[in-house]
Image (tube, helix red, strand yellow):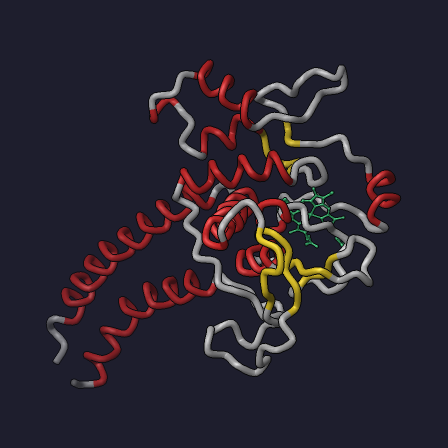
Amino acid sequence: MSTNRIRKWIFPLLVPGIVILALSQVSGVGHGVATQKANIDVHDTASLQNGAKYYMNYCMGCHSLKFSRYNRMAEDMGLNEASGFSADEVAALLKENMIFTKDEDGKQDKVGALMKNAYSTKAATEAFGTSVPDLSLVGRSRGTDWIYSYLKGFYNDPSRPMGVNNTVFKDVGMPNVLWELQGTQELDHSADKGDDSHGDHGAPKLKLTKPGKMSEAEFDKVALDITNFLTYVGEPAQLSRYTIGIMVLLFLLVLWGFAYLLSREYWKDIH
Ligand code: HEC
């Protein structure tokens, strides 16, 4: 191939190449602790709905999601007209299963309300000795693997005020709110820490010492669904972003075709 011919190819190939590389870099940030991989799928609406249900029941009492509204969440999770739900049906479903917060008059929050809760920072600081963060952006700041590992990483530690510690959040101030479902775990000192045969990079091993209401697999699914939900909450637009991303790549492909034809036209008389 002559240099001219190579040069001809470089530009049409370079542009889509750079775009694909940039897109592949957007996801995944390491945080220096050993985490387990969370295989979530933000398009799995059943998983999102289940995660939201658990979140509202077990987490919302302490952690608000102050940038999100109940009805937008329902819409995004497939509780919408396109899936055959009328606005009244969605409102009824939300009020029954998801909305446990109250407005200033002490009435159940409306479907269009922001997901705030009544826990004041002062009360939280007194109760836990630390602030209770809003979790709107935790999916982005901590990442999905971290959240999943965090929810599964509580273990008994009598030296801590809440009686628990956490494998990815040392000396955590949060109680293990899911212990009834999961059971209680303890550090497994007998496990070989350097062993990476499970692909978890030598994370501290835990063993279940008292079973909960759920089997290990059932609990894993709950932790995964809550993680999925928090990932969606961190960036609701990602549901449409993926579709737009594919459209953009298709567009670039077509553009590349035209650019190639054009460059052939330009170079056809030069040998
Ligand atoms: C009883 C109150 C309470 C409940 C209920 C609760 N948390 Fe927490 N959570 C806390 C406190 C307090 C902290 C701060 C811990 C610290 O800073 O040591 C925290 C921290 C966190 C963090 C880490 C945030 C960060 O980036 O530092 C995550 C993630 C989290 N909670 C998720 C959840 C989830 C998911 C649920 C429901 C399954 C839940 N929490 C239920 C009190 C609570």
Look at the image and tell me in which quarter the N terminus lies: bottom left
The structure residue drawn at horizontal position 41% and vertical position 25%, both measured from the top left corner, is: 80
- Nearer to the camera, 10 or 68: 68
The structure residue drawn at horizontal position 76% and vertical position 15%, both measured from the top left corner, is: 105
The structure residue drawn at horizontal position 63% and vertical position 60%, both measured from the top left corner, is: 185
Tell which residue pokes out farthest to the bottom in this image: 2
- Nearer to the camera, 86 or 268: 86
Q: Is residue 133 above or below residue 89?
A: below
The count of marks equals 0
The structure residue drawn at horizontal position 49% and vertical position 22%, both measured from the top left corner, is: 93
As drawn, is 159 to the left or to the right of 17? right
Dividing the picture into quadrants, the one containing residue 85 is top left
Dividing the picture into quadrants, the one containing residue 226 is top right
Q: Is residue 235 visible?
A: no
- Nearer to the camera, 166 or 270: 166
User: What x and y, as percent, mark residue 51?
Assistant: 51, 41
User: What x and y, as percent, mark residue 27?
Assistant: 48, 60
Dividing the picture into quadrants, the one containing residue 62 is top right
User: What x and y, as percent, mark residue 7?
Assistant: 26, 77
Look at the image and tell me in which quarter the C terminus lies: bottom left
Q: Is residue 246 visible?
A: yes
User: What x and y, as percent, mark residue 245?
Assistant: 37, 50
Tell which residue pokes out farthest to the front in this image: 210
Q: Is residue 135 above or below residue 90?
A: below
